[in-house]
C-alpha cells in the first residue's frame, strides 16, 4: 500500500491518483524503454520491475515472449535429441523460428496465470497484466542465452547439437560443458529475477516469492520430465 502525503489515505501500491483526495501519488510511466529496462534488470532489478508495473503500456512483452518461445522450442529439440530423428537441420532451426512465437505466448500466458493464482494463495495482490509483464521480463537472461550462446552452440556443433549420434559432449566436451554452463546460469539468473519481480508486483515477502518460484520450478520440471516420455 502507498499512503497519500496529502490526506493519508492508503492506496494500492501502483495507484497514481489518491482514491480519496485525487492528489497525485507517483508518476505514471507511459512507455518502457527496452535498453533502459534491460540495463535496470541487471543493475537494480527491483526498481526496474517497479517501473514495469507502473508502465501504462507493457512494451516488448510480445517480442520477449516470442524469443523465449524460440528458446523453449530449441530446448525441447535438444532435450529430445530430435536431430537423430529429423536429419534436416534447416527444418529443426526453422521449427524454432516458426513455432517459437506461438509457444512463447502460450507458455507465458499459462505460467503467468499459475503465478497469479499461487501468488494470491500466498497473500499476494498482483494483477494478471503486471504478473505477466514481470514474468516475461524475468526471462530476459534466457533470451540473452538464445541470442548470444545458441548461435555459438550451432556454429561449434552444427546439427549434432540436437543429436545423440554422436552426442555433442563427445565431439567437444570442453566447449559443450562451458556453453551449457552459460545456459544454466541464464536459467538461474531468470529465477532470481522472477523472485524479485514477484516481490514487486505481488507484494509478497522475499521468502514467499522464493516459495512461489520453487513451486513454478517444480511444475516446469515435471512438465519437462514428462516430455522425456512423450
Image (cartoon, rainbow, N blue to C red):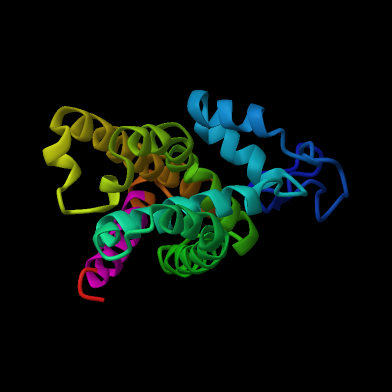
Res 227 visible: yes
Q: Is residue 19 left or right of residue 214?
A: right
Q: As drawn, is 230 to the left or to the right of 108?
A: left
Q: Indicate whether 171 appears above or below 76.
A: above
Where, by quadrant of the figure, is residue 185 drawn? top left
- Residue 5's spot in the image, x, y percent? 76, 37
Residue 203 can be seen, yes or no: no
Is the magenta region chiefly helix, strand or loop? helix
User: Which one is nearer the viewer's eye here, 135 or 34?
Assistant: 34
Q: Magenta part of the protein: which range?
A: 210-227
- Does 33 appear in magenta? no
Q: In x, y percent, where is residue 135?
A: 51, 52
- The relative height of residue 56 versus residue 82 in the rendered view (above or below) is above
In this view, the residue in front, 205 or 99, is 99
Where is residue 99? Give x, y as percent: 52, 63
Q: Is residue 187 left or right of residue 21?
A: left
Residue situated furthest left in the rendering:
170
Which of the two residues, 10 or 69, is positioned nearer the viewer here? 69
- Please name the residue shown 77% across and 49% down the image: 56
Q: Is residue 165 left or right of residue 125?
A: left
Which quadrant does the C terminus fall into? bottom left
Eyeballing the image, is 138 above or below 174? below
Q: Percent from the top left, x then y, of residue 206? A: 38, 44
Residue located at (60% from left, 52% from top)? 133
Amino acid at each position: 500500500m502507498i499512503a497519500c502525503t496529502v490526506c493519508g489515505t492508503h492506496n494500492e501500491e501502483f495507484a497514481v491518483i489518491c482514491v480519496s483526495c485525487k492528489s497525485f501519488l507517483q508518476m505514471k510511466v507511459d512507455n518502457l524503454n527496452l535498453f533502459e529496462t534491460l540495463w535496470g534488470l541487471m543493475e537494480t532489478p527491483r526498481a526496474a520491475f517497479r517501473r514495469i508495473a507502473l508502465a501504462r503500456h507493457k512494451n516488448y512483452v510480445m517480442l520477449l515472449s516470442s524469443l523465449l518461445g524460440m528458446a523453449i522450442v530449441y530446448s525441447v529439440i535438444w532435450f529430445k535429441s530430435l536431430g537423430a530423428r529429423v536429419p534436416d537441420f534447416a527444418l529443426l532451426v526453422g521449427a524454432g523460428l516458426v513455432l517459437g512465437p506461438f509457444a512463447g505466448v502460450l507458455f507465458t500466458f499459462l505460467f503467468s496465470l499459475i503465478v497469479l493464482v499461487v501468488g494470491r494463495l500466498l497473500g499476494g495482490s498482483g494483477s494478471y497484466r503486471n504478473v505477466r509483464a514481470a514474468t516475461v521480463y524475468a526471462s530476459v537472461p534466457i533470451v540473452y542465452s538464445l541470442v548470444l550462446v545458441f548461435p555459438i552452440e550451432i556454429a561449434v556443433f552444427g546439427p549434432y547439437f540436437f543429436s545423440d549420434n554422436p552426442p555433442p559432449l563427445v565431439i567437444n566436451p570442453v566447449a559443450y560443458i562451458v556453453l551449457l554452463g552459460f545456459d544454466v546460469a541464464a536459467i538461474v539468473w531468470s529465477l532470481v529475477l522472477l523472485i524479485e519481480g514477484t516481490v514487486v508486483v505481488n507484494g509478497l515477502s522475499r521468502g514467499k516469492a522464493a516459495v512461489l518460484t520453487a513451486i513454478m520450478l517444480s511444475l516446469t520440471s515435471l512438465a519437462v520430465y514428462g516430455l522425456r516420455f512423450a
